[in-house]
Amino acid sequence: MNIVAINSSAFAFIVLIIWWFWLSRPKARRETGIKPIEVLVDNGVYTPSRIEVPVGRPIVLRFLRKDASPCAEKVLFDDFGISADLPVGEPTDVVIVPKQAGEYEFTCQMQMYRGQLVATAAS
Amino acid sequence: MNTAKDPVRLSISGMTCAGCVATVEQALQNTPGVEQASVNFAEHTATVSGSFEVKTLIKAVKDSGYSAAELRGAEDEKEKEAAEFAHYRKLLRQAIVAGIVGAPLFVSGVLGRMPGMATQNERLFWLGVGLATLFVLIYSGRHFYIGAWKAFRNHNANMDTLIALGTGTAWVYSMLITVYPDIVPSLARHAYFEAATIIIALINFGSALEMRARGKTSEAIKRLIGLQPKTARVIRDGVEQDIPIADVGLDETLRVRPGEKIPVDGHVIDGHSSVDESMLTGEPLPVEKKVGDEVVGGTINKSGSFLFQAKRIGRDTALARIIEMVRQAQNSKPAIGRLADKISSVFVPSVLIIAVITFMVWANFGPEPRLSYMLVTTMTVLIIACPCALGLATPISVMVGVGKAAEYGVLIRNGEALQAAGKLTTVVLDKTGTVTEGSPTVTDIVTADTWQENEVLRFAASIEGGSEHPLAEAIVDAARTRGLELDSASSFEAVAGHGVTGSVSGKTVALGNEKLMLAHGVGIDELATDAEILALTAQTPMFLAVDGKLAGLVAVSDPIKKDSKAAIDRLHRKGIKVVMLTGDNQKTADVVAEQVGVDEVIAEVLPEDKAGKVAELQERGDIVGMVGDGINDAPALARANIGFAIGTGTDVAIESADITLMRGSLHGVSDAIDISRATVRNIKQNLFGAFVYNSLGIPIAAGVLFPFFGILLNPIVAGGAMAMSSVTVVSNANRLRFFKAGGKK
């Protein structure tokens, strides 16, 4: 076994893990916030998971849960103190008013489902 | 089949312009049975009435190029349970299929009956096993791989990532050495197909168990939702008819017969009965209801039949608001869970890094067959790590704890309040309505000079006619009982903490305490001794002055609640100091304090100063819980570390309090503290377990014990431990369901 190659690959892997999971972000989907934003809850992810919205406007996030496992049953917006139960197959609306620009996380109870609401000043 | 009465709401996706609205509306209108369909573009919803199957509507929308799903206001618990049960069975089925394939391989392996990989036939056998394993991975473990891939694309990693990588690596490596055995040294030619299948079986089985256990954690909210009746008996145009509860309108007249549930909130307008409110307040005795009394939806009418007028319907009923509050509180997290949250959010990538380091260390320092060791330890690290146990530790206990509190008639606003309630060192009680019943009555009238009792009472009641103070109500009631004619008061003025002044029948009248008399230059010497005696027997004396001269004394007494003393004793047993705060005079307050056994009395406090007194206690280092009616005491409740609103379901009270005690008893304070302490203890156990499990499990899986004791963890054992770790957390939280307030478990 070529130890040098293994070690180099391992280091490269570690760098990749850090970069992909912690340093880089998925591309945000830009929304106007005028109509409800549909978020699919399935297979361990929110789709879209990163949503850019204008600041100061009420945003309706319409969650549609397809994953029947209990992990997906709640969505929490810790920064806003808002949470909702998501019944399977039933669209559930969550209304958020991001008053300040910033990145707000929404997660399931166990932090495995993760998404971000990015509020930016309207251009 | 939908009926015309019950319109269906659909959420419509894919509409981009007003033109789409017309298309969707047309599609719905053309569906057989639809009487009316309207689409709201702003909300992206459609409301459809008529007689039809909802799925035909959804299909019609889909055929027109959009998609639709039904929006339902009230949660259908049965449907939800059916969906959960279906998922549970699916998990079990997947576990069994994986077990059937994996178990024989595992047992044969343990018994050493598995062939090697030397001959063509042996390799063909392993190829067959590999394909069977692939079938298991696809059938039973598909969700892990899809989840892992989708999470990866979203720059996220979760439990699926770990399982998919762990089992995926095992399969790919095993398949490679089966097809190309020469790429590894002969000693490392060991296939791990059985590990992949058994791990998938165990984790699916664990998820199924967890799901069953989790169902029990939401029992409290299910019980509350179950209190909502489905129908109401409404009287329309003189005809009684049963209608779905959603159709009840405001101010409609409803009939409730004995044994029935009261459908919505309202006021009794005819008849009387006793109502069992225990499901909401925890108060075991039925409450008498007569004309004018408030009735609450979800409570049970015991004896008589009565009519009432609906005053709060739908989401505005007390029950609906309680359900919403409990739900929100169940989803909120106390500070104690923040660290676990932070760790959870970086957990999986960290485990991936540890797995890579494990791989590297074994490659550099491991014995032969090195490749096998590298693979087994890396796989075991991935499999044993359990982010779920850590992530679940806090919320699952909060869910059970908040639910349990609701059963005791204690509504906890959020996780912060739940955690803080257990740390209180001092409880401040407002007197009127908290320690006492809050329904004072006139107990004595003493006259001065040549005044008659009824005249004194008539003046006192006339001046108090405009006041909303509970003491004023008592005086007015007493005058009415005696059949006295009251005059209207003019220039009425309430002087907070002193009393009232004004003009009755052309005379200047002042009614209040000693301070008010002093301020008006009225001498009270004649009745000073009477006033002192009355105060010493827990009655509140009020002086009446007419045209600047003392006319008499009206004594009002507010009976102490039967269980106040026992409840205060219970607080003492917890080592909590009890302070009584009141606007009443010092002597009356002292007597009440002595009867119930509080440690400190702060009397003659103006309403606006109550918050300041709470702040003073806090400055002494006390962690203060303030108990009051939630309306007059709102600032003090807000100032305290925990504000308890007692015995009232009013909006203001619920809004201003951290904890609402729906039962009038002070025992609710102790119950809340007991539940808080039990829940926080439970959370700590869970967090401790999850931390210890992961921080011991991962290093052992990586092989730290191998150099010293030659111990290496089998990946299958890791899979079993991982599957059981979250089940253990949920089961521990479920123990809280058996909690009994009063310290008995």
Image: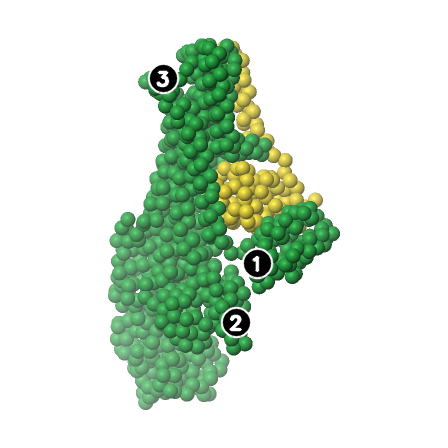
Give the structural element (helix, strand or loop) at label 1.
loop
Residue B687: x %, y % from top left: 38, 38
Which numbered mark, 1 or 2, is in the foreground of this view?
1
Q: Earlier in the sequence, mark 1 or mark 3?
A: 1
Residue at image point 40% right, 17% down: B114
On residue B112, the disc is 3
On residue B251, the disc is 2
Residue B738: x %, y % from top left: 32, 49
User: Could you classify mark 1 by the number of other residues whose Cα lies within 10 Å: few (under 14), some (14-19), or many (20 or more)?
Assistant: some
Question: What is the chain identity of the residue bearing mark 1?
Answer: B
Residue at image point 39% right, 65% down: B300
Residue at image point 48% right, 29% down: B136
Whole-angstrom CA distance, mark 2 to mark 3, is 80 Å
Position of B677 relative to B437 (above/below): above
* Colour for chain B in the figure: green
Residue B7: x %, y % from top left: 59, 60
Taking A31 as reference, is B382 left or right?
A: left
| Disc 1: which residue | B2
Say which amino acid is labelled 2.
Asp
- Marks 2/3 same chain: yes
Taking B269 as reference, is B249 left or right?
A: right
Give the structural element (helix, strand or loop) at label 3.
loop
Residue at image point 51% right, 75% down: B239
Label the yellow chain with its letter: A
Visible residue check, residue B360: no
